[in-house]
Amino acid sequence: MRPMPGWPATPMTVSASRVQYIWSPILGWALLTCSASLALAQVGVAVPGVSDTPVTSSDQTTNAPGDQTGGTSTPSTAGGLSPIVTPAPVARPNTFGDIALPAGTTVANPSTQLIPGLSDTLGGAATSIYGGGANGISLAGFSGGGAPGGDELGISVGSFRLYPAIDITTGADNNVFATNNVGTATTTPTTTPTLSLSTVVAPSLALRSDWLNHSINFMLGGGFGFYASAPTQNYQNYFLIVDGRIDVREDMALAYSFGYRRATEALGMANVAFAQAPTVAESFPVTLALTKRFNRFSFEVGGGATRLWFQDHSTITSGGLDAQSRNRNAYEEHLRFGYDLTEDVTLFVTPSITQTRYDLNPDTLGQTRDSSTAALGFGASWVINPTSTIFGNIGYASSSGAMGSTSAITFALGGAWNGYTPLSIRPSLSRGITETALSAYRNTVTTTLGVEYSYQVFDEFALVGGFSYSLADYQPADPGTLGTAPPAGARTDAFARGSIGFLWNPRPQFSFGPIFEYTQGSSTDPTGPAYTRQLLSIRLSARR
């Protein structure tokens, strides 16, 4: 049965006799952004998401391989950001406090993550209460609330429930600076990669309302990384997000979110233009959306604004933009029209527009990077059963500005399968237009394919991991719009990442075990990435 308006759907549960995970495969813009790696987790909230933006504009400093710049993505075909983006946590059904699947590969973004071990409940996904997520994906049946195992997780505080957690990951990274150590037809190895021991501490605290009507959630957390042999890569990231829903009436609701997040950009990924110490990206997102249902039809109108500003802590390469040239505001407006074909299948169409407005026009290189984007998307969601779902959209987006125009077919496809109780699989596929911090290009078209899995091998042991592959196709700026930046030709960066871990879960509150992760970057451009990177770590997670 379809859940009553304003109520979250039945949770999807992966269970065993001694451990239980409840998780929320929300698409939004954050396509299944789950746990993070130690060495690459130089991003805190985003972005999903994360997720650093409002309902459809995004600070991609957290989760977009096509824009490690903290930029704003153009809207997806479904009305909202490119599905590869992880925006800031925004109003949605009560899902915080759900326990993420164990650490694996971040499907939506193989390059940077929020903080280790945290799911996209922190990344967030803007949603209407009637299955009208800002990117047009029906969330009916995709989210769940409540702590697993009764009162085993979460602490009752009046009419609220408190969820404290901490993840500690320590290990060795054999290429901390993502040094080009692989020779290709266009690149040659540079210097010897740097090996470093590293530790990431990621505390979080969530206070979630437990009301019959309305909802409000407070989320506070951070990710603090320390590298013994590479102190310039140390980072301190944190976020504070408030989101909720006001039930105006039984068939109408107002969703809202606002907050602050600080993130840092990881070396060796698409669009990164600094030399050593990561650039810090800060954002302040605000979102608002009103949803109304008419029997089988639903309608949503929403928008948001995000302020983004940056701090350089290293020399920016000659092909990049400095911090003051990247400071900007992003705005988004969208509509969504949905129709429930059956109790489990929803069709939708979503037009949207976004505007990106930079502080400096022209900037320090003499460029004017302001742009506007229009998008139209069509999609559907299908709740196959309480533990298996599929949802997706396809459409067309066109971005235009002083540096040129980019048009692309965009799409998003995601799902969750738990047909066999011990095994849970979450695939995703996405394509969208994102901002870039490289001065010779106007933006990138980024495509990402990924899958995450969790398999309960024995009563207390789980095999976890995943794989992702991402392509960032750079769009050169039009001649005459480069200012003092040197011209550049076509360029495509590719990133592959895989991970596998074996976790011991003696109780639902604890997990412990080793995780191995492999990352590879390559590029058609001689100045692009050409490296391999391995990380072996031990992770301890505790939550109450």
Image (cartoon, helix red, strand yellow):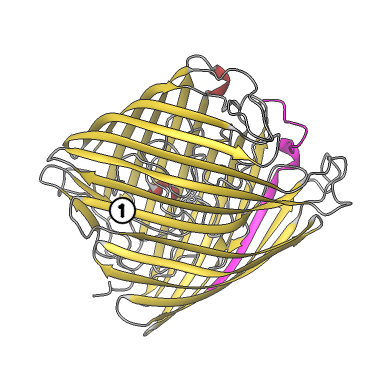
Relative horizontal placement of residue 441, taking residue 522 as reference (left or right) = right
Name the quadrant containing residue 431: bottom right
Residue type at mark 1 is: Ile
Query: Left or right of 422: which side holds 359?
Result: right
Q: Position of residue 414 (x, y in %)?
A: 41, 60
For residue 375, above or below residue 66: below
Q: Which residues are magenta?
A: 314-335
Is 350 contained in the magenta span?
no
Residue 526 coordinates in the image, percent (x, y):
71, 35
**Percent from the top left, x then y, of residue 34?**
39, 46
Rendered residue at 35%/56% (across/down): 25
The image quarter in which residue 327 lies: top right
Q: Which residue is mark 1?
A: 425
Q: Is residue 273 left or right of residue 464?
A: right
Which residue is at the front of the view, 223 or 155?
Answer: 223
Quarter of the image for the N terminus: give it.
bottom left
Residue drawn at (21%, 37%) of the image = 509
Position of 393 relative to 508 (above/below): below
